[in-house]
Structure formats: C-alpha cells, structure tokens
Image (tube, helix red, strand yellow):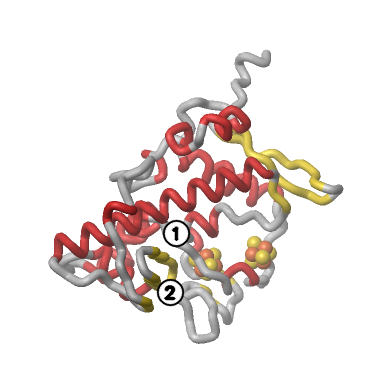
Amino acid sequence: MKVRINHCLLGGKPAYDVQIIDRGATVRDYLDALNDFIREHCPPCNGCTACCWERVPLTFPDVAAFLRDEHFRRQFRGHPSPLLSFLRRYGYVYVEGPVVDIGLGFRPDGSCIFLDARRGRCSIYRLRPMVCQTYICRLTTRRAAALRSLVVNAGMDELVRRWLAESRRCGEKPVMHEAIRPRPRPADYPAGAFGGAEDFACVPLKKLCPSRLWRSLYHDTRESR
Ligand code: SF4
Ligand code: SF4
C-alpha cells in the first residue's frame, strides 16, 4: 500500500484524510486507496443518486479507460479518432473564449448520461471517472481536498490538450456542444504531469504536488519506526 486514507473527525463529524507513504505512489494508488476506503467504511448509497446530477469533469485517462473497454471500443472501431467520437457521443464540451470544460454528457433532466435512474445506480461503475471515484460522502481535510482538486484539474487539462491535438491531426473543427466566442489555444494546455499518460498508474503524485503540499501529505513510515 502506497497511499492511506485515514478516518478522522472535523468539528466532531466524520471526515477523511490522505497520507502518502511511498515516494513512488501514483494517481492509481490514490484511487485504489479511496476505493478500498469507500468499500470498507462508507455505507452503500442505497439508491441515493444525489452526486450523479452534478457536472462530471473528465480527465484524459478516464476517456482512455472507456476506450480500452470492449463495449466502447467496439462502438468507435474504425473511426478516425475514437477520442473525438467518444466525446461527441458521451461528453459535453463547453468553450467560452479560451476556457475549455470537458465533462460527461447529461440528460435533459440534468442527470449523468450513465445514471441508471430506474435502478438508482451507476451503469458503468467500474469505469466511473476520477471525479466520481474521488468523491467520498463525508468531510475532507484541507490537504485531501487540495490533492483531489490538483489531480482532477491536471487530468482535465490533459484531456483538453489531447482534444485539440486530435482535432488538428484529423483536420476537424474541435467537437463543441456549447460555445461562446470560442478561442481555445494549445499554448494554454501544455503537457503537464499527465502528459502522454494513458493510465493513472503512469502519473506519480510527487510530480503533481507542489513541494509544500507534498511535505504535508508524505509521511515516510520507515523513518518514524
Ligand atoms: S456518494 Fe453520492 S450517491 Fe452515494 S450516498 Fe453520497 S451523495 Fe448519495
Ligand atoms: S459516471 Fe456513474 S457515478 Fe459518476 S455521475 Fe455518472 S452515474 Fe454517477
């Protein structure tokens, strides 16, 4: 185990904190630790779908995971760009001036495109995006919230970078579902810590975290023995 999610209390209410215990920990280790914590400590959603009616930002490895899955891969086989086809069909690309926001698509009632409202559950739970996997229904320490926001934002920027690059490669106008004077600029989306990564396991947390946040999150258990 390279990342630990710890139970704690904030103002007397249940909360969680994050501790990185291995310098080589990746975003995949962080997600695995969160998923283990949810399984072991959080009551089942039992039909509650409250967080499936909000905007669901997408990161590049989220889309890559969908496209590795046989069900989705089959749908876009032979397309010039499966990434752009996926975004056209299941995403929602909003552009305002230079700012780009890519999320999952939603239905007219505002529910996530993958919500099975009749059964009250996610229809693609195993593939649910990072923002869904990192949502824990309890309070969060400041550093845990900072890590979540950093990881999600960096992964989103990488998706925008790939969306622009793929559109250019295919000679297509970028897919947009809603746009107000769009002026997306590749220079605003340089390759960061997620650059080129198809999987969360390829992104070290240390590369993402500014040194102050890293010092607050990293705890070498060998040193404290
Ligand atoms: S995680 Fe979302 S769906 Fe589950 S109980 Fe919490 S708000 Fe409801
Ligand atoms: S992907 Fe699944 S868990 Fe995430 S918002 Fe949609 S239905 Fe809910």
Which element carries disc 2, helix, strand or loop? loop
Residue 61 placement, left or right of 84: right
Q: Quadrant of the C terminus?
A: top right
Indicate the amino acid at tag 2: Gly
The residue sitting at the right extreme is: 12
Residue at image point 28% right, 52% down:
187
What x and y, as percent, mark residue 196?
Answer: 28, 45
What x and y, as percent, mark residue 185?
Answer: 28, 59
Indicate the amino acid at tag 1: Leu
Which element carries disc 1, helix, strand or loop? helix
Instruction: Indicate the quadrant where residue 64 lies.
Output: bottom left
Mark 1, ligand 2, within 8 Å: the answer is yes
What x and y, as percent, mark residue 144?
Answer: 63, 43
Q: Is residue 91 visible?
A: no
Q: Quadrant of the N terminus?
A: top right
Crowd class of label 1 (few under 14; some 14 to 19; many from 20; radius 10 Å): some
The numbered disc on residue 127 is 1
Q: Is residue 119 visible?
A: yes
Crowd class of label 2 (few under 14; some 14 to 19; many from 20; radius 10 Å): many
